[in-house]
Image (tube, helix red, strand yellow):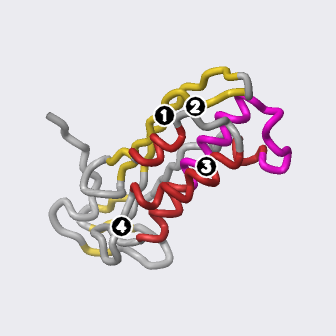
Amino acid sequence: IAIVTAGMRIRLESAPTGLVVAESGLAFGGMAASTVCAKRTEAFLVGKPLAMDTIWAALDILPDDLPLEPGAPGGMIEFRRTASAGFLFKFWMLVMAKAAPELVDPADMCAAAPYHRPVSKGLQHYKETGDRIIVDQSLGPFKVKGGVGKSVKHLCA
């Protein structure tokens, strides 16, 4: 299972030319045995203007900070590379949309929109019938023994 996570922060300062990056922190999970910081990308961003050219250049540096060898544990190497770059891009667009919306092309504004969806949930209905359980009426009852196939309350410490 390839799971990629990211934690990012940025501090901007005003400059005569506009907003510039004063500090940045970019941490990624799922790209190594433990969380890694994209140090070269962080250093590159400091002193750079809040602009699209800056993020395109940073995205060129990011893969060097997060190397994944072919056959790395967890698999799905290209997915993990793409997801980490996507997280950085979306973060940058969100920062631009909040700090300097006039710099964002309206066609790109959707990249800055937060993604919300309802929490997933599932439910299964079944009837207990002695040592038989009916999962689907069309399939009929199945013989079971012990706790397999029966409702068991969860006990916690």
Element type at marker 2?
Answer: strand
Badge nearest the viewer, 3 or 1: 1
Q: Residue at x 27, y 69 (%)?
A: 73
| Marks 2 and 4 close (CB-CB < 8 Å) | no
| Residue 89: mark | 3
| Secondary-structure class at tag 4 | loop
Nearest the camera: 110 or 100?
100
Q: Is residue 20 left or right of residue 154?
A: right
Q: Which residue carries the number 4 mark?
A: 68
Badge 1 marks a residue whose secondary structure is strand
Q: Quick check: is 93 in the magenta stretch?
A: yes
Around disc 3, counting alpha carbons within 10 Å, would you say few (fewer than 14), some (14 to 19), or many (20 or more)? some
Precedes in sequence: disc 3 or disc 2: 2
Under mark 2, the amino acid is Val
Distance from disc 3 to disc 4, alpha carbons, whole Å, reads 19 Å
Check disc 3 and report its element: helix, strand or loop.
Answer: helix
Q: In the image, which is nearer the foreground, mark 3 or mark 2? A: 2
Say which mark, if any, is on residue 21: 2
Q: Which residue is mark 1?
A: 24
Q: Please tell me which of labels 4 and 1 falls first in the chain.
A: 1
Q: Which contiguous range is marked in magenta?
A: 86-108
Give the spatial CA distance, label 4 vs label 1: 23 Å
Q: Amino acid at mark 3?
A: Phe
**Neighbourhood count class around disc 1 (C-alpha, 10 Å): few under 14, some 14–19, many 20 upward:** some
